[in-house]
Amino acid sequence: MNPAEGVIHPAWLRLTHWINVVAVVLMVMSGWRIFNAAPIWGFSIPAGITLGGWLGGALQWHFAAMWLLAINGLVYLVLNLGSGRFSTKFLPISPRKLWADFRAALSGHLDHDNLREYNAVQRAAYLFIVLDLIVLVLSGLVLWKSVQFPNLRELMGGYEGARRVHFIAMALLVAFVVVHLAMVALVPRTLLLMIRGR
Ligand code: HEM
């Protein structure tokens, strides 16, 4: 038997997924500490769930983990798009199918018999988070090298606008992770699959 038979998530996908988890946790927690140094909204993040201890320390974590996030994300995108996996796994997606699967999910009737195929809700959620991460990286680029990316900066409403875009994209990412973890808890077989690949 071909040893590749039965593999649903190839090794590169599992590796980039779990590296991304580490990078995202480091980025979000250090980002919260950076936010606390100059909050743009009327609240701060509880210090106990932030990383870095102080602004300088948090920036070092953020700058270190951003390479992990960006390079790992690029590897995922290149392999996913290059292998054709992206279009077979995430497309097609239609509003009608999305609505039907969403309603089925809410009423507990979405079947998970075929783990090879993502349902429309999963497709939409994964496409959304890939786009959201791209927005996070681009707005992060503006905050890091504002002078070097004037067009991108103006597109985001200037430096202050980019801070807001960056924060809102982070909040959407955290919301995705909460829902994502709840879904994995509901169908734990998928976790085994993301670890073992089959
Ligand atoms: C401890 C945290 C996490 C766990 C346990 C987890 C678990 C999983 C599992 C089990 C799957 C496969 C779902 C399936 O087969 O139906 C999956 C897929 C995915 N996860 Fe996560 N995940 C975590 C964090 C994250 C984070 C932080 C992100 C991004 C911000 C993320 C993005 C994705 C994406 C995009 C996919 C689809 C990948 C593809 O097929 O190309 N996950 N995750």
Image: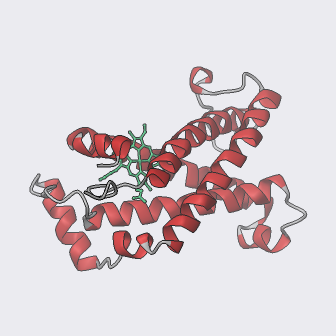
Q: At 73% across and 67% down in the image, what residue appears?
A: 157
Nearest the viewer among 159 and 84 is 84
Task: From the viewer's side, name the closer residue of 184 and 29.
Answer: 184
What residue is drawn where x is 63% and y is 56%? 136
Picture layout, residue 35 above or below residue 69: above
Q: Residue at x 57, y 53 (%)?
A: 168
Residue 198 is left or right of residue 100, and the answer is right
Q: Position of residue 23 (x, y in %)?
A: 60, 41
User: Quarter of the image holding residue 28?
Assistant: top right
Residue 25 position by quadrant: top right
Q: From the viewer's perspective, is residue 28 above or below residue 113?
A: above
Q: Is residue 131 in view?
A: no
Residue 110: x and y, percent? 14, 58
User: Which image quarter: residue 1?
Assistant: bottom left
Image position of 67 with respect to 148: above or below: above
Residue 72 percent location from the top left of the image: 61, 52
Coloring basis for residues: secondary structure
Residue pictured at 60% horizontal, 59% vertical: 75
- Percent x, y for residue 129? 48, 58
Please indicate, yes or no, whether residue 125 appears anywhere in the rendered image: yes
**Horizontal relation, residue 30 to residue 182: left or right:** right
